[in-house]
Every structure is written in C-alpha cells, then in structure tokens.
Image (spheres, rainbow, N blue to C red):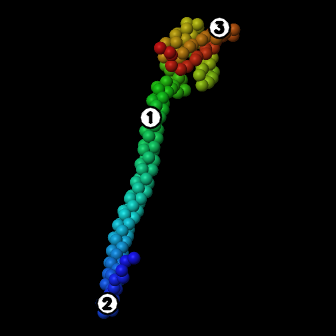
Amino acid sequence: MIPASGIIINLLETDRSRSRKKKLGAVALLLIMVMGGILAGLYYSALNACQEQQALNRELKIRMAEYRKLQLSLKDSEAIKQQIKVKSDTVAEIEDCRISSTEILQEIADVLPSGVLVTKTRITPDSISMSGLSPDHSEVARFISGLRASPRFKEVRVVASEAGAVSSETEFVVEIDWGVKSR
C-alpha cells in the first residue's frame, strides 16, 4: 500500500477556474451573438440582393414577352405588306386587261361604216351579239374586217348575212368574243 500523505485545504483562497469558466462562457456567448448578428446581416443582404435579382428577372421576362409580341407583329406586318404588294400587282395586271363596255362600244363605233345600221345589241360579260342592216355585203365585210383588226376582240363570227326579201338591204348578225387577244 502507499503511505498516506496529507491533504492541504486553503479556506481563504477562492477557486478561480469557475469564474474563468463563467467569463469564457460569457465571451463565447458574446462571440456567438456577434457572429449570429454578422451572419444575420449577411443573410439579410443576400436576401435583398436575391429579391432584387428576382424582380429584375421578372421585368426582363415581361420585356422579352413584349419584344416577342412586337417581333411577331413585325413579321405579320411584313407578311401583310408582301401580300398587299402581290395583290396590288395582280390588280394592276387585271386593270391592264380590263375592258369597259363603254370602250367596247366606242371601238365598235370607230369601225362601223357610215352606211351600216346596228338595230340590236346584246352585251354579256364576255361577248356581244349585234344585228343590223347594211346597203350590201361589202359594207358588212368592211365592218367585220374592222372588228377583227381591233385588239379588244378575241374572235368575230358572222352568224348570218343575207339580202333582205322586202328591201335591197343586207341583214346581218355578228357575234364577238371580247377581251384581250392572246399574244
């Protein structure tokens, strides 16, 4: 066994390790609070920055949607302009080929010999039928030649041309297909 040694107890002196532990605990708590405050500040700052970025992102998405709408409407308007151009070209071609009834009647009047009398005229959208009287067949032939020379008439047909039974005048019936002759 080991011989006993004496134990010394100092009643006047206080144990400083306990107060040190309290001080260290307080310092640690203070450091934890300071670090928590710093972390909370950083978190708040990062949260604000994130919210600002999200707001900016929403605004950019709205602008992108508006841009796409404008881009689509621009494409639509360009397509419409192209369609209008094509249609206006088509209208111009049609107007070049269009012939009015007044122009047709003027053309007939220009080639009508003075002795020929037109008694009946029937105009349809693509043809004209005329009947009348002439002093003789040569005047009818001159009238038909003038009609055939016109660029406004596609085809000129003599349906009937005969001397009248009662008078010496020649009765005739002419059919004309009108429009621009194919070149």
Tell me where residue 10 appears, x and y as whole percent: 31, 90
> In front: 110, or 6?
6
Which residue is the extreme one toward the bottom? 12
Q: Is residue 10 above or below residue 151?
A: below
Q: Tell me whether circle 2 and circle 3 mark residues in contact (CB < 8 Å).
A: no
Q: 55 or 182: nearer the eye?
A: 55
For marks 2 and 3, give the one nearer the viewer: 2
- Dot 1 or dot 3: first in sequence order is 1
* Whole-percent x, y for residue 7 in the image: 34, 86
Q: Residue at x 64, y 11 (%)?
A: 159
Q: Which mark is residue 82?
A: 1
Q: Is residue 24 above or below residue 151?
A: below
Q: How far apart are marks 1 and 3 (CA)?
A: 57 Å
Q: Give percent across and percent down for residue 20.
A: 32, 81
Amino acid residing under circle 3? Glu
Tell me residue 108's x, y (percent): 53, 19
Which tag is nearer the camera, tag 1 or tag 3? 1
Dot 1 alpha-carbon crowd within 10 angstroms: few under 14, some 14 to 19, many 20 or more: few
Out of 151 and 141, give the one closest to the viewer. Answer: 151
Q: What residue type is labelled 2?
A: Asn
Note whether 144 is above or below 97 in the view shown.
above
- State the SS at label 1: helix
Q: Can residue 140 be seen in this view?
A: yes
Amino acid type for the residue under numbered disc 1: Gln
Mark 2 or mark 1, earlier in chain: 2
According to the picture, the residue beneath numbered tag 2 turns out to be 10
Graded by Cα atoms within 10 Å as few (under 14), some (14 to 19) or many (20 or more), the crowding at tag 2 reads few
The residue under label 3 is 162
State the residue at coordinates (47%, 38%).
80
Q: Is mark 3 on a helix, strand or loop?
A: strand
